[in-house]
Amino acid sequence: MYSTSPGAIGIFDSGYGGLTILNEIRKTLPDYDYIYLGDNARTPYGTRSFDVVYEFTLQAVRKLFERGCQLVILACNTASAKALRSIQQNDLPKLDAARRVLGVVIPTVEALGEISRGGNIGVLGTPGTISSGTYDIEIAKFFPRFRTVSEACPMWVPLIENGEYDKPGADYFVRKNVEELFAQEPDIDTIILGCTHYPLMLPKISEAVAGRAEIVCQGPLVAKSLASYLERHPDMAARCTRGGNVEYLTTENPDRFAAAAANFVEGPVKATRIELA
Ligand code: DGL
């Protein structure tokens, strides 16, 4: 049985990508405490099977629960697409029915009505997210008239995790996948970066898109949605501590994590290594 004491908000991703979500959440909700967990030792998740992504994600959620988090955000589209529903429906009732796990896909899709002018949506994501069809399904539910095309970008997360996101080698893969997306539908007006790692390559993606469509980063949308969730659920807000602190956990070398994360987040990063099982 987990503790009922208030705890930090848990933010989970397979690696560094969730930091793009954490940054925006902290801008919107600076008073709360956060624990960021990156499973850097086992990234990328995007090429793994449903079963494995579910197993790894559940391990991460359990770890964050053990650390006292009453609310966990899966700041990873692959985990949101492949594991969130099972965790919410099957695992949470057994683990602790009062705790909550939320994802990043629905807050992104919900916002499209205000963003897209023509309803022609392009989604870029990991092979796992794209093959799950989650975006196509959710967009069709919320906006039946919208059309969605999507493209898997298998090389983008490895480029980012290996610090190549701003190097010339990344240009080839960014241009290739963006052109493959437009080849499916030249009239796309809105492109969702459906992987939380991708905003780290935004300058290159913007260059490749060259003004043909609006590019949507999820961070501000997830932050707004979380703020609204906490307002609508004061009981949960009261179970999240407020001190403005962030703790970083990684399954890889903590110094390596801290050095890489320092490029993406403001303020000092001191990481602790943990094991997931
Ligand atoms: N940031 C994760 C996402 O949003 C990347 C998944 C991966 O590790 O491939 O999908």
Image (tube, rainbow, N blue to C red):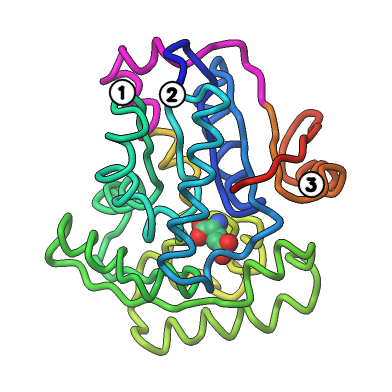
Residue 241 at least partly seen: yes
| Residue positioned 64% across, 61% down in the render | 43
Which amino acid does the dot numbered 3 rest on? Phe
Residue 49 horizontal side relative to residue 97, left or right: right
The disc, 2 or 1, on the residue closer to the chain's N-terminal end is: 2
Give the percent coordinates (x, y) of residue 125: 47, 68
Which amino acid does the dot numbered 1 rest on? Ala
Circle 1 residues within 10 Å: few <14, some 14–19, many ≥20 = few
Point out the residue furthest to the left here.
Answer: 144
The disc, 3 or 1, on the residue closer to the chain's N-terminal end is: 1
Q: What residue is shown with label 3?
A: 257
Give the percent coordinates (x, y) of residue 166: 77, 65
Ligand 1 visible in quadrant: bottom right
Q: Is mark 2 in CB contact (under 8 Å) with mark 1?
A: yes
| Residue positioned 45% across, 34% down in the render | 72
Give the percent coordinates (x, y) of residue 173: 64, 81
Q: What residue is shown with label 1?
A: 98
